[in-house]
Image (tube, helix red, strand yellow):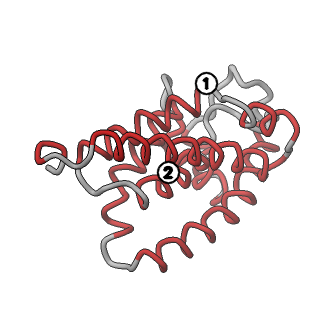
Amino acid sequence: MITSDNMRPNVNFLLSHPAHFIALGFGSGLSPRAPGTAGTLLAWLLFPLLKTPVSDFVFFALLVSLFFAGVIACDRTGRALGVADHGAIVWDEMVAIWLVLLLTPPAFFWQAVAVALFRFFDIVKPPPIRWAGRHLHGGFGVMIDDMLAAGYTILALAILVRIFGMTPWMMN
């Protein structure tokens, strides 16, 4: 058991249980710097592979399933690490950014803006995100605060798209 958020899990921990492999974002959570950003970037890279073969409805249903799987995986991994929302747990960022990307214009520009906005809201944690992180516990608490950050991101992105429109240079 790892007992401090300052201590990093390793590859042996990652591979010791399927829940750890999921919660640590297939290993992206092992990044020594900015593991949440590493998990978000990996999710962005994986998005076209996951989304392309299915409809928006099927992908959304998959995200709901991945959210609940994340509740279980993050809870088990947090207990094993001794810290409920250990920095290496990045599945919450991954599922949240997949939701954001589902609702983002498909152009690279808008996806990059969405990723940057999501990381901003996930790091700054405006209300009620910080409240949720403090008062909701276990895997659900880990997962829900990033869903709230995704909500802020989707709202901010919608405002930006409305203000700036979809000029040709933003479409590629």
Nearer the observer: mark 2 or 1; the answer is 1
Q: What residue type is labelled 2?
A: Phe
Q: Is mark 1 on a helix, strand or loop?
A: helix
In the displayed structure, 1 sits above or below 171; it is above
Which of the two residues, 85 or 12, is positioned nearer the viewer here? 85
Residue located 40% across and 42% down the image: 114
In the displayed structure, 125 sits above or below 109; it is above
Sequence-wise, the earlier of marks 2 and 1 is 2
Residue 165 % position (x, y):
26, 46
Horizontal side of 88 relative to 40 (left or right) equals right
In the displayed structure, 25 sits above or below 5; it is below
Looking at the rendered structure, the number of numbered marks drawn on it comes to 2
**Number of residues whose C-alpha sits closer than 10 Å to that of mark 2, classed few (under 14), some (14–19) or many (20 or more):** some
Q: Could you tell me which quadrant the N terminus lies in?
A: top right
- Residue to which mark 1 is pinned: 124
**Residues at circles 2 and 1 in contact by the CB criterion of under 8 Å:** no
Horizontal side of 40 relative to 78 (left or right) equals left
C-alpha gap between disc 2 and disc 1: 25 Å
Which of the two residues, 106 or 79, is positioned nearer the viewer here? 106
* Residue 114 - label: none
In the displayed structure, 3 sits above or below 94; it is above
Dividing the picture into quarters, in which one does residue 132 lie?
top right
Residue located 69% across and 50% down the image: 143
Residue located 65% across and 61% down the image: 67
- Residue to which mark 2 is pinned: 26
Dividing the picture into quarters, in which one does residue 146 lie?
top right
Which of the two residues, 85 or 21, is positioned nearer the viewer here? 85
Q: Which residue lies furthest to the front in this view?
A: 163
Residue 86 % position (x, y):
70, 34
